[in-house]
Image (spheres, helix red, strand yellow):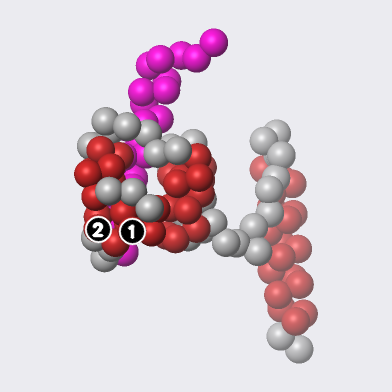
């Protein structure tokens, strides 16, 4: 069963994020509408939180602007790139000392590759 309030918050985040990202990248609503194969009024409806983009459009937006779907959907607040071959997903329960070890290892291997 869906929580209507949670779903509403996700739609609001998508609209706000989409507008912010589109403007920061210098893309017009017309250009984005053409990319997604929709009318400019549909983009306006996305950005004003009247309707939620279909999943296919969300993926196209994420790819076009190189942002993760998690960021677009409001799951995370850090704009992680969609295309990122250097990202490591760590368990939620990782301890600080384990994280320190990982960071030290990365620093060590980076220094080794300089030689």
| Depth check, front residue: 86 or 15 | 15
Spatial separation of the CA atoms under disc 2 and disc 1: 6 Å
- According to the picture, the residue beneath numbered tag 2 turns out to be 30
- According to the picture, the residue beneath numbered tag 1 turns out to be 34
Measured as percent of width and height from the top left, residue 47 is found at 27, 41
| Residue at (68% x, 59% y) in the render | 103
Label 1: few (<14), some or many (≥20) within 10 Å?
few
Q: Secondary structure at mark 2?
A: helix
Let me know if residue 50 is in the magenta part. Answer: no
| Residue at (24% x, 50% y) in the render | 40
Res 24 seen here? no
Measured as percent of width and height from the top left, residue 27 is found at 28, 63
Most distant residue in the bottom direction: 115
Let me know if residue 11 is in the magenta part. Answer: yes
Report the side of 105 relative to 66 (left or right): right
Measured as percent of width and height from the top left, residue 15 is found at 31, 39
Whether the residues at callouts 2 and 1 have beta carbons within 8 Å, the answer is: yes
Measured as percent of width and height from the top left, residue 51 is found at 32, 32
Q: Magenta span: helix, strand or loop, mainly?
A: helix
| Residue at (68% x, 48% y) in the render | 89
| Residue at (77% x, 80% y) in the render | 112
Q: Secondary structure at mark 1?
A: helix
Label 2: few (<14), some or many (≥20) within 10 Å?
some
Asked which quadrant contains residue 65, the reply is bottom left
Read off the magenta span: 1-25
| Depth check, front residue: 110 or 44 | 44
């Amino acid at each position: 069963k869906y929580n209507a309030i949670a779903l509403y918050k996700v739609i609001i985040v998508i609209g706000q994020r989409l507008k912010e990202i589109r403007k920061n990248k210098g893309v017009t609503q017309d250009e984005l509408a053409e990319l997604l194969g929709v009318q400019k009024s549909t983009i306006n409806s996305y950005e004003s939180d009247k309707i939620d983009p279909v999943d296919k459009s969300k993926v196209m937006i994420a790819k076009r602007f190189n942002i993760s779907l998690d960021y677009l959907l409001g799951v995370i607040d850090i704009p992680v790139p969609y295309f990122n071959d250097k990202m490591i997903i760590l368990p939620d329960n990782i301890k600080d000392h384990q994280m320190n070890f990982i960071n030290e290892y990365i620093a060590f291997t980076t220094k080794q590759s300089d030689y």
